[in-house]
Image (spheres, rainbow, N blue to C red):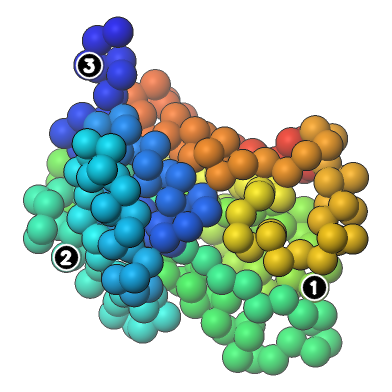
Amino acid sequence: MSDAESRPLQGQVALVTGASRGIGRATTLALARAGAHVAVCSTTPAGSEPVAAEVRAEGGSALALWADLADAGAPAALVERALDELGSVDIVVNNAGITRDGLALRMSDADWSAVITIDLTAAFQICRAALRPMLRRRSGRIINVSSVSGVMGNAGQANYAAAKAGVIGLTKSLAREVAGRHITVNAVAPGFIDTEMTAVLPEAARQAAVAAIPAARLGTAAEVAAAILFLAGPDAAYITGHVLHVDGGLGA
């Protein structure tokens, strides 16, 4: 196997948010193994440094970054720092997200706003900042992490579902705006994935979730990362504005 086949992202720079665990960590490792230099982004050094160290231990290249994406200027500043440190940002994976679940009638304005700010607004601001240099170079890949909740809705997650549905609308709109400059913008919509977020579910809820999935199991973070890696790579050059479901058939 040639280097181009085994390391198709050699020489490219990828920025991954929410990279400290779960899907973000798995994506960081997958991109690094494909040859990308990865800017590992989390809310604190304690989140990003260990993952960056893990990449380096495997022989890859990584830069640990951190930012509170709830701060108005932080998303754009994160992109600028990556550009300053690494010279370019060729691939963006907007994976950072939070939940503040609750029935809509009891949901506070603060819980609504917190989820919309991190899961949707910050993703838009990162896209906007990254697209400027991508447009000048006439190349780039953006992959936004949505959710099956953003496709189907989910009781008790009005804020999260609205944000993730917004991510899909953002993805499709940006794809139409920048396709002529050889920039693709796609989304993945994971279903129930076996991560720290789902590990806290009560066992009854976990069993009910599995029972609803045609594949009869939770997905893995590595399976979502594989979908993101594909969309970031050269074989996906003619795919844009697409939402790739990684959900075991839950949204079929």
Dot 3: what SS?
helix
Q: Which residue is mark 2?
A: 81
Location of residue 64 in the rendering, given as x and y in whole percent from the top left corner:
24, 60
Q: As drawn, is 24 to the left or to the right of 234?
A: right
Query: Quadrant where the N terminus lies?
Result: top left
- The answer to whether mark 3 and mark 2 are in CB contact below 8 A is no
Q: Residue at x 24, y 10 (%)?
A: 2
Label 2 element class:
helix
Give the residue pinned by disc 3.
3
**Residue holding disc 1:** 156
* Between 144 and 195, the one nearer to me in the picture: 195
Q: Quadrant of the C terminus?
A: top right
Callout 1 secondary element: loop
The image quadrant of residue 17 is bottom left
Residue at 28% x, 62% y: name it. Answer: 49
59 shown above or below 163:
above
Relative depth, front residue between 172 and 193: 193
